[in-house]
Image (spheres, rainbow, N blue to C red):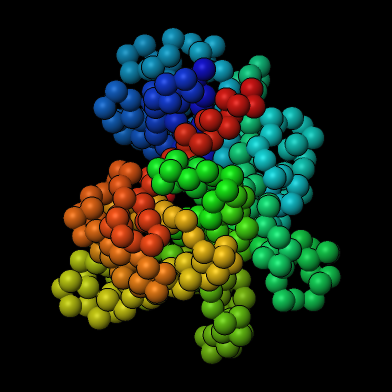
Amino acid sequence: MNILVVNCGSSSLKFQLVDSETEQVKASGNCERIGLDGKIVYKSGGKKTETKSSLPDHAVAISKVLDMLTDAKDGVINSLDEIHAIGHRLVHGGEKFSSSVVIDEDIIKEIETCNDLAPLHNPANILGIRACQRAMPRIKHVAVFDTAFHQTMPAKAYLYGLPKEYYSKYGVRRYGFHGTSHSFVSKRLAELAGLDYENSKLIICHIGSGASIAAVKNGKSIDTSMGMTPLEGLVMGTRSGDIDPAIIEFICQKENISVSEMTMVLNKKSGMFGLSGVSNDCRDIIEASENGNKDAANALDVLAYRIIKYIGAYYMALGGADAIALTAGAGENSSEIRKSIMDGLSAIGVEMDEEANKKRGEEVLLSTPSSKVPVWIVPTNEELAIARETARLV
Ligand code: ADP
C-alpha cells in the first residue's frame, strides 16, 4: 500500500509517500510559505528539486504535491489511484483521542473541540485534512495525534496544582506531545535492548528543536515533560521549558508587554536561542562555545542539566530504568550533547563508551557492557510511524 503522510502547519505542508510493505520512502518534500510567496521542495530517487510556486492556500499546495507525485518525468506513481490512504499528523487530540482514528465529519468536529488547546496548530492541521479530502475524496484519511500515546498517564502525573475547576471547565492538564516519536522509539528500544516491551521501564529523550522526555512503563506512557502545550519541560531551540510562573507577570510589568507578547517570547525567543544569543541550532551554539563564547557554553550546560534532572525524576517515577534512548536531531547526531548528558547519569550507574559515541544517526549502544542502564541512540521516524498507523487502520 502507498500511504501519503501529511503534516500541515499554518504556512507549510510536509509530505512523504511511503510504501507500507517495504517501508521505503518513494518521495518526500515540503511546501513552504503557503499564503506568502510559496516554495516546493521535492525529493525522490536521490534527486532534490526546489521550485518557487504560487501557493495561495493549502488546497493549491496539496494539488501541486499530487501533480509532482504523478508527474511523467519526476513522479513516482502513474496515477492518484496508487495512493491508498492518507495519514495526517494532528498536534492535539485532548482527552478525546487516545489512539489514531479514520477521519469522518464527526471526527473533524471532535478535533475542532480541541482547537483552543492548540490554537496555532490544530486549525492548520484541519485545513490540511479538508484540502486532502477534497483532492482525494474516495480514499480513507487517518488522524494520528501527538498527544494520544500519553493518554495513559495517571491523574497524579497529568494534574497541575491549580484550582480543580480549571481542569474540569477548561481541560487544563498535562497532555504531552511527540507521542508518535516516543511510541516508535520506545518499542524499538525494547527490541534493541532485548526487553519485553510489555514488561519494561524505559526513558525516552527526544532532543530536537522541540524536546521532551517520556517515562514508558510496560509499553505505556506514565509521564512526560511537555504539558498542556509544548512549552513545558526541557529547554528547547526557542522555547523556555519550565520556568517559575511568577516570572511572566514580573517581566510583563518591567518590559511593559502583554501576556500574549510574553508567551511569544517564551515560545520563540527563549530556550537555547535566548540563552546563547547565537542561534536556536545546537550546532551553531557548540561552535560558538568552542570559540570561547561563555553564553553559548552556559546554554549547553543548562540544556544537559535539565535533561539529567528529568531522567533522574523519571528513574524514580518508573522505579528504575531498564534502558534509556536518545533520539531526534541532537540526540541522534551530537556526541557533545550526549556526552554531557551521560556524564550526569553516573548516579544510576551509566557508563559511556567513548568510541560508540563518535557514531551518529544510526542505532548504536552508547554505554559500556558494565553500564547498569544501557543507553541507545534510536533514530526516530515519525512519518514511518504515521504510515504504519494509517496502514493498520485502513
Ligand atoms: P525538529 O524538532 O524540528 O523535528 P530535529 O529533530 O531534526 O528537528 O532537530 C533539529 C535540531 O537538532 C537542530 O536545530 C539542532 O539544534 C540539533 N542538531 C541536529 N544535528 C546536530 C548536530 N550534529 N549537533 C548538534 N545539534 C544538532
Along the horizontal axis of the image, is 380 left or right of 151? left
Q: Is residue 317 left or right of residue 111?
A: left
Q: Is residue 81 visible?
A: yes
Does 31 sit left or right of 329 as displayed?
Answer: right
Name the residue at 71% across, 60% down: 154
Q: Position of residue 351 (x, y in %)?
A: 30, 64
Q: Which quadrant of the view contains residue 308?
A: bottom left
Residue 244, horizontal then vertical, whole percent: 57, 82
Corner quadrant of residue 251 = bottom right
Is 52 left, or right, of 54 in this rendering?
left
Of 221 and 297, which appears nearest the observer?
Answer: 221
Query: Which residue: 52% across, 30% down?
Result: 387
Q: Residue furthest left?
A: 291
Rendered image quadrant of residue 222 = bottom right
Q: Position of residue 106 (x, y in %)?
A: 79, 35
Relative image position of residue 151 (x, y in whole percent): 68, 52
Furthest toward the front, the residue is 370
Give whichever of 226, 121 is nearer the camera: 226
Q: Quadrant of the C terminus?
A: top right
Q: Which residue is at 61% across, 85% downward?
A: 246
118 relative to 156, above or below: above
State which image quarter holds ligand 1: bottom left
In this rendering, does residue 252 appear at all?
A: no
Q: Number of numbered discs present?
A: 0
Residue 32 in the image: above or below residue 178: above
Q: Residue at x 57, y 40 (%)?
A: 89
